[in-house]
Amino acid sequence: MEPQRGRAAAALLAESSPGRRQRDGDGAPEPTQQRSSWAQRLLGFEWADVSSWPRFVCLLNRPTDPASLGVFRFLFGAWPELPGPQVPGWAGGLSLPTCELPGAPAAGLDVPALRGHAAGCPGDHAGLLLPAELPALHAALLVRLLVGQDGLEQPLLPLRPPWLPAHPHGRQPLLIFIVYFIAGIKKLDADWVEGYSMGSLSRHWLFDPFKLVLSEEMTNLLVVHGGGLVLDLTAGYLLFFDATRPAALVFVSYFHCMNSQLFSIGMFSYTMLATSPLFCSPDWPRRLGARFPACLRRLLPSLEPPQPSEACVYGGPERKGRGRGERGPGLRQKLGALFTVLYVLEQFFLPYSHFITQGYNNWTNGLYGYSWDMMVHSRSHQHVKITYRDGATGELGYLNPGVFTQSRRWKDHADMLKQYATCLSHLLLNYNVSQPEIYFDVWVSINDRFQQRLFDPQVDIVRAEWSPFRHTPWLKPLLVDLSPWRTKLQDIESSLDNQTEVVFIADFPGLHLENFVSEDLGNTSLQLLKGEVVVEIVKEQRNYTLQEGDRMQLPPGEYHKVHTVSPEPSCYMYVYVNTTDVALEQNLTELQELRDKVQNGSETEPLPPELQPILDGALGDSTQPDPVVQAFVRRQQRLEELQRRRNATLGARLQRFAARKCFLFRRSFLMTWISLRNLVLGRPSLEQLAREVAYANMQPEAGVAGTEGVQKEPERAEL
């Protein structure tokens, strides 16, 4: 076996066996006794190989073992089945009509064609997954365009696959290197370095081992943010070199496995796991297979050396007297080398191309999927309101946020909001709304800042202009000048008791926030931190002017409007106590105390029948227990289940983990099958489709497919 050489992008610029002479007509390498230079040992090629364009073309087309890339193609095709289709819409939809938001129609792309490629590959905005449905296009470029045309378009298990030019194998690890490194560069953002981007992530149980020696704040700063920054900046380099690759594979694998549990990001984590072996020697599967017993090798692909390939170049451009089957670089090899160079340059350019795609700048650095701003920006939505107006009659109405769609990303991206508004305008015609106008009032906090508007609520989005190449005028800017307030806001939150909650708001001059105080919030006040506002109590038709530091109580069960009248943005906060929750908690505490007294014998009086469930935990069907008793019993059941899970053995935990993954795989397989069948044969009746989806979602055990660890954004349409 040949020695393994250091490479990541080196595979892009090297043949499969360093320190070897040129191959003969059969494609077999000839050994050499010449001692290789440091460049050959470190990079896998000599500096002379890049001294001219002809030599560079020969270098990119040197024969390379296709085994590693074949394994990657297999894993890349198999991994989507693990996360699988996550929503019934993949099965053809259960509720019609719906609004599809793939992020492509606004740019004039063919969405159905892209969706056909994306089956089993739900899009997300991280890693290899490009914006919305564009992961399908990226997968086609990686697997078909960049690989299939270069010698892997063979039967599934060919007896002797041909040698492969170096550049198809090298483009893949080089792309992953770019993803890691650019993601690390983007994490040098002040929000990430200061620990605001993923501020609540350290509360997850996966970080409990670190919290044995560090506080939660230090775990957040050093492990989550510091560790993520260091890993992204160094992972590509550590995977590049032989000496550091084993440790790097362990760390990046652990990192991606954690991400699969922490976030709902589709197949990204699994794709990154599949790409890690690409940094190893191209023939590692063949050398690994040779270590298996002879009886098992029959089940593996052939371990014979690859066949000669006309796609490869054997020897340098000036070599004379080539052997049988050898030839110099032709047009195909030159075009492949040119495409490779342009492709790599494009990947370096796209993360910083947002001066071109200005229409996607939604408090990020542009077209999100190309920017590699992975997890740099975390958002929470506090208030979302959709208002429609009949253009003919002037009648106003309101829509539930997210109606007619299963996507949540329209709240954060101007292009998707435009698509969503256009779709809603067509659907409202079916409800006798003529010439519909649609207005969105979306309040978002990014990285623990004030809640503020993302879009102008006075603009009809249906008729608003949007272009990927121009600034979106109805997109409100991020109030970065208020960022220093975050430390003070944290101090205010920490000074409150556990029963009191606070929401921090910042608004633009000339706009107002319309809000409703629930009757459950019997002690709600508004305090002005900066600027000047006028609070209008709608029912009383009275206005109250607040200066900086002023505070007023808000009546429960009524609407109010907060008008910003100062020339600069106003900042204020709602402070409230959910009196209903407080009363319920007091009642539950009393029931817990009564239960403890009965169990320890200090309470001798028999319990009345309506309180008997607090002891046996049984809610009979014949009687209607008190709602507080029902809440107490359900809470006790949850606590007992949580305690059982905490006290479970390692084997039981692994079994439960495997059961969740098996359920997810089963559901993914069934939903993919339903989707493909519907594409070929058409969609059956809604009743049959509902039964099939219900069967796919059937869980063998309650809570098996829970959403533990998935980061969900809080969303409230009112206080």
Image (tube, grey):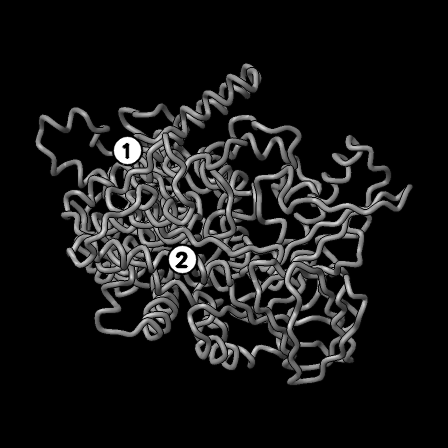
> Which residue is more in the foreground, 584 or 287?
584
Q: Quadrant of the C terminus?
A: bottom right
| Disc on res. 306 | 1
Is residue 515 left or right of 635 when viewed as pictured? right
Reply above or below: 504 against 567: above
Q: Quadrant of the N terminus?
A: top left
> Which residue is more in the foreground, 587 or 467?
587
Reply above or below: 46 against 118: below
**Disc 1 vs disc 2: which is toward the camera?**
2
Can residue 492 be seen in this snapshot? yes
Reply above or below: 215 against 603: below
Residue at the spot x=34%, y=45% of the render? 634
Residue receiving disc 2: 177
Residue at the spot x=80%, y=70% of the render? 542
Q: Position of residue 385 (x, y in %)?
A: 68, 53
Q: Earlier in the sequence, mark 1 or mark 2?
A: 2
Residue at the spot x=41%, y=44% of the render? 626
Q: Residues within 10 Å of mark 2 (few under 14, many from 20)?
A: many
Residue type at mark 1 is Pro
Q: Residues within 10 Å of mark 1 (few under 14, many from 20)?
A: many
Q: Position of residue 541 (x, y in %)?
A: 81, 66
Q: Position of residue 715 (x, y in %)?
A: 55, 55
SS for dot 1: loop
Q: CA distance from mark 1 to mark 2?
A: 28 Å
Residue at the spot x=51%, y=56% of the render? 714
SS for dot 2: helix
Residue type at mark 2 is Phe
Q: Residue furthest right?
A: 392
Is residue 527 left or right of 627 when viewed as pictured? right
